[in-house]
Amino acid sequence: MNRKKRNRRIAAAAMAAMFSLSAFGAAYAGEWKQEGGRWWYQNEDGSYPSKGWQEIGGKHYYFDQDGYMLADTTTLDGYPVGKDGAWITEDAKAAEAAADKALHDNDANRAALEAYRAELLNGSYQLAISQFAVLDLDQDGIYEVHFWGSHEQRFTQYFMYYDNGVKKEEYLPKFAFNGVGNGRYMISGLETGVMTGMVFELKDRVVSPVDSFGYLTAAYQAGNVDEQKEQQYQAQMVSYNVVDASEENINRYLGGNGESTGLFEEQ
């Protein structure tokens, strides 16, 4: 038996055993509640799970120390959870991969990928493109691309999407992409002691600003509204993988029906 597969099976068995023995493995009748874009679960007796796992409706969910469900990430004990927060078993991974493949098997996506590939390989950006990421921000079956590079010591980055042709949003060097989630992405940056950021949404093939924040880091005080706003958005978002902009990678991830570069936690 393949050693890696054997280890995964052992880990899955250990996980199942943990659920059967742990207090968090018991199922409680209760209801899901949402607060600030994050989900938590109230048990029938009014309590809520935290710092561990709980089985709810036949699925297993992980809750942080404040009682919020983790989603689209890897838990502290090393197990992947999906967009819905449920533990991703090997069977669930296969089903999710098949569903993702079917979602992106369409002519509009292939047209977008062909246009992206041409932009990265032949585009006139006057910059050396260093890295890129492929993601489907709004899960509409058409991939988008985030890429960046440098020209004469100037760092530049773009968010590239498709609507009957390639469209691009360019961002200043001081900003960095800090996460994606729920059809949105956030950029932020620190300059001369001021943290500023913006949140954008991709909807119906149009990118629109949603919110912004800014505060003096040196004058930060507990309860700062913009600091809290930034933290709330970060809690709703995840990071994603980037790859080197080699011709091999461009053809791999942007060829055929495309391939997401994946979430950072999946590395």
Image (cartoon, rainbow, N blue to C red):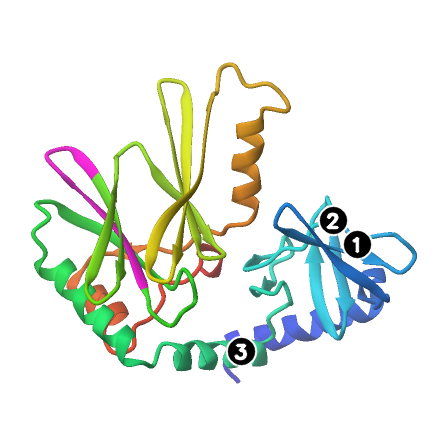
Mark 2 Cα shell of 10 Å, populated few (<14), some (14-19), many (≥20): some
- The percent position of residue 239, horizontal first and vertical second, equals 45, 51
Q: Which mark is residue 5?
A: 3
User: Residues under labels 1 and 2: Cα distance?
Assistant: 6 Å
**Element class at badge 2:** loop
Q: Earlier in the sequence, mark 2 or mark 3?
A: 3
Q: Mark 1 highlights which residue?
A: 49
The magenta region covers: 144-155
Q: Earlier in the sequence, mark 1 or mark 3?
A: 3
Q: Which mark is residue 64?
A: none
Quick check: 138 above or below 35? below
- The residue under the point 77% across, 68% down is 56
- The residue under the point 56% across, 64% down is 83
Q: Which mark is residue 67?
A: 2
Viewer-side label of 1, 3 = 1
User: Residues under labels 2 and 3: Cα distance?
Assistant: 33 Å
Q: How many marks?
A: 3
**Element class at badge 3:** helix
Residue type at mark 1 is Pro
Where is residue 13, by image quadrant?
A: bottom right
- The residue under the point 54% across, 29% down is 227
Residue type at mark 2 is Gly
- The percent position of residue 60, horizontal first and vertical second, equals 71, 67
Q: Is residue 142 visible?
A: yes
Q: Earlier in the sequence, mark 1 or mark 2?
A: 1
Where is residue 135, by image quadrant?
A: bottom left
Residue type at mark 3 is Lys
Nearest to the observer: residue 206 or residue 47: 206
- The percent position of residue 236, horizontal first and vertical second, equals 55, 49
